Amino acid sequence: MTDPITFDSTTDRLGLPLLFVGQAQKEFYVNEAHALLDILVHGAIEGAAADPPATAADGEAWLVTAPASGAWTGQEDSLACRLGGGWRFISPQDGMRLLDRSTGGEIRYLGNWRKAADVVEPIGGSTVDSEARAVITNLIAALRVMGLLPAA
């Protein structure tokens, strides 16, 4: 596993490298910041896994689940991003939102990763209100389309 790159001065939230006066190799710092922004702006993951995929293309990101293994050992809950043929890990921050391409749904981080539980359409009951059921069914469908509920 490659050692993570550390910078003397970074932004508080995302750890983007900051330039300092008279710095040599500015392109290295700027390129690293751009690579991180490329992953995090409009963030999307391929899915969640405990093991690194056998074949991953640069630019892919995965949510590391427990128990992580291989190159991902010790990186549970982090984003594993494939960059330059290696893995770069990003720690989640409160408020982070990601599209999970494997489910089409959205996940959010607030102390831990969260996603909406599935909701079923109403069935049965002693009194049936067809108009209310139609509205509830339409709301559930709309929330699924927006990725706020898992796809049926």
Image (cartoon, rainbow, N blue to C red):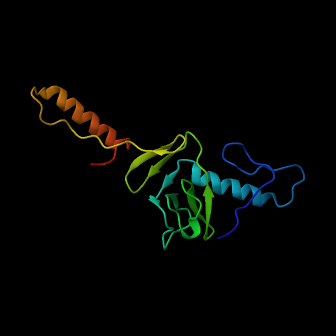
The picture places residue 129, in percent across and down from the top left corner, at: 13, 26
| In the image: residue 125, left or right of residue 93 | left
Q: Quadrant of residue 26?
A: bottom right
Name the quarter where the N terminus is drawn.
bottom right
| Furthest-front residue in this view | 67
| Furthest-bottom residue in this view | 54
Q: Quadrant of residue 137?
A: top left
At horizontal 64% and vertical 54% (from top left) the residue drawn is: 36
Vertical placement of residue 52 versus 115, above or below: below
Vertical placement of residue 149 versus 134, above or below: below
Vertical placement of residue 87 versus 147, above or below: below
At horizontal 75% and vertical 58% (from top left) the residue drawn is: 6
Vertical placement of residue 7 versus 97, above or below: below
- Asked whether 114 or 9 is in front, the reply is 114
Count of residue discs: 0
The picture places residue 136, in percent across and down from the top left corner, at: 23, 32
| In the image: residue 104, left or right of residue 62 | left
| In the image: residue 123, left or right of residue 120 | left
- Asked whether 96 or 78 is in front, the reply is 78
The picture places residue 120, in percent across and down from the top left corner, at: 24, 41
At horizontal 56% and vertical 60% (from top left) the residue drawn is: 80
The picture places residue 99, in percent across and down from the top left corner, at: 45, 49
